[in-house]
Image (spheres, rainbow, N blue to C red):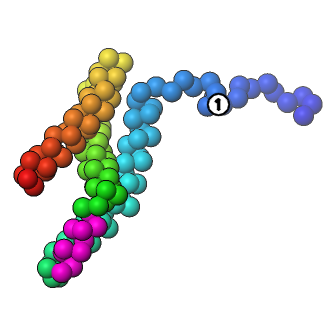
Amino acid sequence: MAGAAERPLSPHLQIYRPMLTMMMSIVHRITGVALYLGTPLLVAWLLAAASSERAFTFVNGIYGSWIGLLLLVGYSWALIHHALGGIRHFVWDTGAGFGPGPRELFAKLTIGGSIALTAVLWIVIWLVKG
């Protein structure tokens, strides 16, 4: 276009380097969607428990399969990760933790904490289950 004023373009994805906090924001959204989609599994288990022993045994059989356990571990990790991310956002809502150091530390604690707490949860489940 002749005579158009030269103005800067909006930054593109090629310009941004992925930062840990950026990735955490994306993962927080993904875990939110996973929780939304996985909640019917919890509802099915509760309905089966409330309806009959036969239905409960059937659902437990499905959830006890390798794919069922994989889904349950993934769901529990998503729940824990999303909760820790929510705590991180709550701290930010107070106005604290916005410096580069605390931001990175919170992100790392969310990742490590969600993995560690999920592992502890499932170790306790297996120990109690016998």
Residue at 90% x, 28% y is 3
The stretch of residues the image draws in magenta is: 54-63
Whether residue 49 sits left or right of residue 22 in the image: it is left
Q: Nearest the camera: 20 or 43?
A: 43
Residue at 29% x, 42% y is 81
- Does the image show residue 75? no
Residue at 41% x, 41% y is 27
- Residue at mark 1: 12
Image coords of residue 17 (percent x, y): 54, 23
Q: Nearest the camera: 129 or 8?
A: 129
Residue type, label 1: His
**SS class, disc 1:** loop
Q: How many marks?
A: 1
Whether residue 14 sits left or right of residue 29 in the image: it is right
Residue at 13% x, 50% y is 125
Residue 57 lies in the magenta stretch: yes
Quarter holding the N terminus is top right
Locate residue 62: give its quadrant.
bottom left
